[in-house]
Image: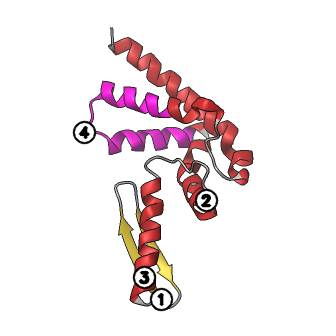
Amino acid sequence: MRTISLRSANADFTLALESEPDAGAETAIRDEVENLIMMTKSHDVGKSEDELLKIFIDADMAVLGKSWDAYKVYAAAIREEYRHVGDVDFCQKRKEFLENTLEGGGKVFATEEMIEGLEERARENMEREIDLLGIYLESVVQ
């Protein structure tokens, strides 16, 4: 078995291959996985018909639909990832990201399975975090 490892700002991925691909196939696989990873920066599949992209983005976003306790752990990890950013700037940008994700009547998730299973809780979690960020920002920004 051969593995291909990729590292991005968001995550590390190792792809296990059953057989030895030729150099061209390996490059194509690496390029496709790298593209998928880069798409996690915007989490926007738009009107794409690419089912793999939709599944990959939904997998990346699945944490948003977990229990509130699990979501808080995720939110703390995001804050840690951006520890170099000051609290006020981070909270403003995080709040903006969450609000933009919820705006426009679009769905958080791209696949029907995730919409049916996690959409409602994801929206509740995100709205709760937006409220908490807003309370914090009101207390520090006069």
Location of mark 3 (residue): 26
Report x, y in % for residue 112: 73, 51
Q: Secondary structure at mark 2?
A: helix
> Cα distance, mark 2 to mark 3?
21 Å
User: Tag 2: residue type?
Assistant: Ile
Q: Which residues are magenta?
A: 69-98
> Cα distance, mark 2 to mark 1?
25 Å
Earlier-in-chain disc, 3 versus 1 = 1
Earlier-in-chain disc, 1 versus 4 = 1
Residue most extreme to the top: 142
Q: Residues within 10 Å of mark 2 (few under 14, many from 20)?
A: some
Write the residue at 61% across / 31% down. 104
* Residues at discs 2 and 3 in contact (Cβ within 8 Å): no
User: Tag 1: residue type?
Assistant: Met
User: Tag 3: residue type?
Assistant: Glu
> Cα distance, mark 4 to mark 2?
31 Å
Location of mark 2 (residue): 55
State whether residue 142 is above or below residue 114: above
Q: Can you tell which of label 2 and label 3 is closer to the viewer?
A: 3
Location of mark 4 (residue): 84
Earlier-in-chain disc, 2 versus 3 = 3
Left or right: where 138 falls relative to 55: left
Earlier-in-chain disc, 4 versus 2 = 2
Write the residue at 53% across / 47% down. 44
